[in-house]
Image (cartoon, helix red, strand yellow):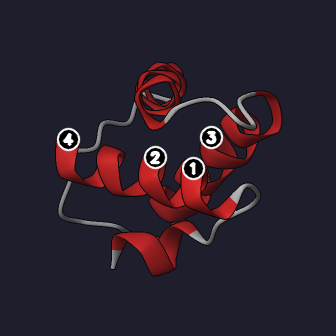
Amino acid sequence: MTDLTPEKLELIQTVVNHVGAYQDGAPAGTIGEELRRGLGKVELTLDDAHIDALARAMDDADGTIDVAAVLR
């Protein structure tokens, strides 16, 4: 996805917040799979590099991350 509009970023942030709420402490690989699953439910896809970046940031932060800051 190259067109990260504010609306798409908001949807991605919602998915990240949801996954983060129940995957706290999970390894980045598990987080990545849950992100893909959640994004699929809202009919969005991200390339592997974006998923990996989000999963690593979530794993490192042990909490909420700012999707826009990670993906830009």
Q: CA distance from mark 3 to mark 2?
A: 12 Å
Identify the residue under disc 4. Answer: 48
Discs 4/1, front? 1
Q: Quadrant of residue 40?
A: top left
Q: Earlier in the sequence, mark 3 or mark 2?
A: 3
Identify the residue under disc 2. Answer: 55
Q: CA distance from mark 1 to mark 2?
A: 6 Å
* Front residue of 56 and 64: 56
Is disc 1 in contact with disc 2, using a CB cutoff of under 8 Å?
yes
Kindly identify which numbered label has been placed on residue 15: 3
Q: Quadrant of the C terminus?
A: bottom left
Q: Amino acid at mark 4?
A: Asp
Q: Residue at x 57, y 49 (%)?
A: 59
Q: Secondary structure at mark 4?
A: helix
> What percent of the width, then of the height, locates residue 48?
20, 41
Q: Earlier in the sequence, mark 4 or mark 1?
A: 4
Task: Say few, some or many: other residues with alpha carbon within 10 Å of mark 3 (under 14 / 14 to 19 / 20 or more).
Answer: many
Q: CA distance from mark 3 to mark 1?
A: 15 Å
Identify the residue under disc 1. Answer: 59
Task: Say few, some or many: other residues with alpha carbon within 10 Å of mark 2 (under 14 / 14 to 19 / 20 or more).
Answer: many
Q: CA distance from mark 4 to mark 2?
A: 10 Å
Q: Amino acid at mark 2?
A: Ala
Q: CA distance from mark 4 to mark 3?
A: 16 Å
Q: Amino acid at mark 1?
A: Asp
